[in-house]
Amino acid sequence: MEKLKYSAYINDKLICFTDIYSAKSELDIPGVRIFSDAAHSLEDVLKELHKREDWTGVIYVCASPKRAWDEFVAGYTIQEAAGGVVKNECGEHLFILRRGKWDLPKGKIDYDESPAEAAIREVKEECGLENLELGSLISISFHTYSEKRKNILKKTHWFHMKSSSDENLIPQTEEDIEKVEWMNEERIRSEVFQNTYSSIKNLLTYYLSQKDSFKSDKT
């Protein structure tokens, strides 16, 4: 996901920092606005992004995407999380229904865990799985939210994983998970894509374009 290296989701709206914009980019979608640092400050662009309900995202074209990204990140407290895209032997993938939206299992990284360890633990806890095979890192995503009057930027590490359709799925109801289900690609595109977060849809679009990309973490 190199094109989205410096990007995050604010209230489910994308902001992408780039030095080159292509009209053929997958970011060229209805509701996305394009600004340059030569004419607009990042502060002003962020204020408008928060206010404008008709905007789906912003592409911020700047001389140094990393410098603009660092300025953006400085306004938040970073919280790290990890999760997985789990595939079974039938080619189906695991989804959770939480607070009325389809999502992928994930959770906060404890202080003594690596991202990979946290991803395995969280997927097991949220879905009731016993056996998981960890694969390679898919990508890292960022999204913002508020908690106890703090502005949080959640950095989530997403891993390939494998499990069996024979596993007994048990939703972690204390985490507001209503359902855990295996879904084929057709159902993902027709059902999940219509009722999930933009960051998850973007991750899945990238993931589904990479065929046979699972690489075991075993050495």
Image: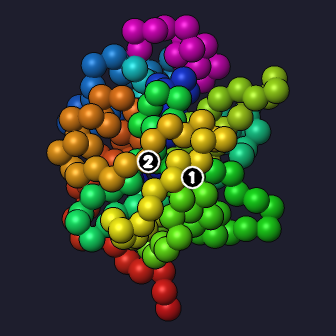
Instruction: Kindly state the secondary structure of the residue where label 1 is placed.
Output: helix
Residue on which disc 2 sits: 180
Tag 1 and tag 2, C-beta contact below 8 Å: yes
Which residue is painted at 40% across and 9% down in the image? 54
Q: Is residue 27 left or right of residue 82?
A: left
Secondary structure that dominates the magenta span:
helix
User: In the image, 37: left or right of 108?
Assistant: left
Amino acid type for the residue under numbered disc 2: Val
Instruction: Estimate the x, y position of residue 42 in percent, counting from the top left.
Output: 60, 23
Residue extending furthest toward the left = 186
Question: x, y (%) of residue 184?
Answer: 23, 52
- Magenta stretch: give its range: 40-55
Q: Residues within 10 Å of mark 1 (few under 14, many from 20)?
A: many
The label shown at residue 126 is 1
The quarter holding residue 187 reads top left
* N-terminal-most mark, 1 or 2: 1
In the image, residue 115 above or below residue 134: above
Residue at position x 48%, y 72% in the image: 132
**In front of the other: 130 or 29:** 130
Q: Residue at x 32, y 37 (%)?
A: 192
Give the structural element (helix, strand or loop) at label 2. strand
Question: Gap between marks 1 and 2, in whole Å?
Answer: 9 Å
Q: Nearer the viewer, residue 77 or 187?
A: 187
Magenta segment includes 52: yes
On screen, residue 213 above or below 23: below
Q: Position of residue 171 (x, y in %)?
A: 53, 48
The type of residue carrying mark 1 is: Glu
